[in-house]
Image: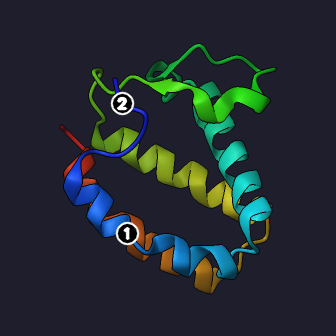
């Protein structure tokens, strides 16, 4: 079971991402709101909820503390579905297209480290 990420390569790619994302996305509170919504959507999505342990609709206060079980294996379909949900959440919070493209550029290289591992 993993809390997040897929090892040193993924962590290295994301190093410094906070410096880019934090101001551009509206600061900590805005990023927390997007994160909470994204994780809540993943945890209740029919395709993705199998990765979440101990989630419930009323657990938003503790949702960041959920364990994510990656032993089931993340498929290309899971990756694509999660990115689709992420874009929906970004649009809901009216994140500008430039910032969405910047985030996509940060996330895209991670696919090879995550899918099928």
Query: Quarter of the image containing the N terminus?
Result: top left
Please tell me which residue is depicted at 28% across the width and 37% down the height of the picture. 75
Please tell me which residue is depicted at 19% across the width and 38% down the height of the picture. 116
Please tell me which residue is depicted at 68% across the width and 80% down the height of the picture. 23
Give residue 54's position: percent from left, percent from top. 59, 13
Q: Decide which of tag 2 and tag 1 comes sooner along the chain.
A: 2
Label at residue 15: 1
Q: Is residue 78 left or right of residue 22?
A: left
Label at residue 71: none
Q: Residue furthest top?
A: 54
Give residue 4's position: percent from left, percent from top. 41, 41
Asked whether 114 or 21 is in front, the reply is 21
Label 2 belongs to which residue?
2
Check disc 1 and report its element: helix, strand or loop.
Answer: loop
Check disc 2 and report its element: helix, strand or loop.
Answer: loop
Q: Is residue 75 left or right of residue 95?
A: left
């Amino acid at each position: 079971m993993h809390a997040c990420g897929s090892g040193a390569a993924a962590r290295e790619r994301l190093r410094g991402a906070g410096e880019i994302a934090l101001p551009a996305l509206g600061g900590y509170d805005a990023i927390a709101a997007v994160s909470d919504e994204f994780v809540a959507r993943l945890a209740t999505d029919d395709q993705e909820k199998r990765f979440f342990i101990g989630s419930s609709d009323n657990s938003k206060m503790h949702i960041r503390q959920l364990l994510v079980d990656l032993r089931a294996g993340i498929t290309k379909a899971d990756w694509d579905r999660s990115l689709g949900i992420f874009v929906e959440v970004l649009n809901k919070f009216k994140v500008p297209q430039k910032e969405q493209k910047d985030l996509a550029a940060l996330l895209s290289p991670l696919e090879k480290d995550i899918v099928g591992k």
